Every structure is written in C-alpha cells, then in structure tokens.
Amino acid sequence: MQSNIRTEIIINAPKEKVWSILTNLEAFETWNPFLVKSKGAVAPGARLENTMKNGDSTMTFRPKILTVKPNEYFDWLGSLWFRGLFDGHHYFKIEETAPGQVNLIHGENFSGILSGMILKKIGEETRQNFIRMNQAVKSLAEAA
C-alpha cells in the first residue's frame, strides 16, 4: 500500500531565501514546530538525524538524502526499523511563481506493509504538522 501527503504554500520571498531556511538544519530547533531538531548535511548520500514531534511524542529517525538541486528540490528516504515496513520518501520542492515569490511543495510518499495502519493513526496529524512547518517557513522567509 502507498499513500501520500502533499502540501503547498505561497511564500513572498526569493527561492534562495526559502532554500537557505530549509537547508539550515541546525536552526530547525529555533523555529520548526514539526522537525524540532535536525543534524547532518544536505548532500546526496548523507544521513540526517531528525527529531520529529507528532502530538505529545517525539521520534528520532535517520533518513538518507537522495537528491539535492540547490534552490529547487531535496528529498530523503527514511524507514521505521527496516525498509519495507514503513518507509517515507519526504521532499521539498521550491517553484518560482514570480520574481520574489515561490510555491513551496512539501510532501511525503509512504509505503510498506504497515503504512496503511500507521497512516490511519497519524496521517491527519502529520498533514497538519507539514502545514504548520510550511507556515513557519513562510513567516521566517517573509520577515524583514
């Protein structure tokens, strides 16, 4: 079974500014309501150490960066315990819509034998966390 979450938000800031916010992982703990801590390099093949907050609990996972296109796109693949059980392909895409304005597309494609069961439990809350993160990126990017 495969399922996905896809969110979008218009941000009135240059793509370079949005990119710098999303890729400054060490600063996540100062502004990010969802990925409350992140360590590592945004580079293909690199492993991150992300701490995610969902509800009252936190969980740390170590996804692998797959693709990096500066100022446009990066993604990672993470798994719960081992591949095929519950995998998440998380991505950030920055599309310039006008000079100084972008559409941030933030999503995740889930797969694995437990994906349906887990998403029934946490899917909507996870979607809301993506939206909260997007709004925080927008606020930070649009600040003077």
Image (cartoon, rainbow, N blue to C red):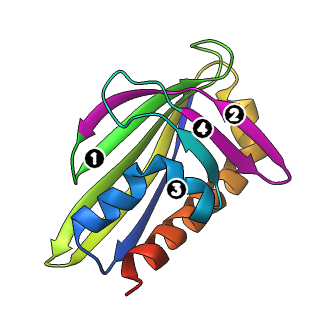
Residue 73, which numbered label?
1
Identify the image quadrant of the N terminus: top right
C-alpha gap between disc 3 and disc 4: 12 Å
Q: Is residue 105 magenta?
A: no
- Going by the numbered disc 2, the residue's amino acid type is Thr
* N-term mark: 2 or 4: 4
- Going by the numbered disc 4, the residue's amino acid type is Asn
Q: Helix, strand or loop at disc 3?
A: helix
Pointer 2 and pointer 4: residues touching (CB < 8 Å)? yes
> Image point 42% across, 52% down: which residue?
24
Residue that label 3 marks: 27
Q: Nearer the viewer, mark 3 or mark 4?
A: 3
Residue that label 4 marks: 50
Nearest the camera: 129 or 63? Answer: 63
- Going by the numbered disc 1, the residue's amino acid type is Tyr
> Image point 28% across, 46% down: which residue?
73
C-alpha gap between disc 2 and disc 4: 5 Å
Residue that label 2 marks: 60
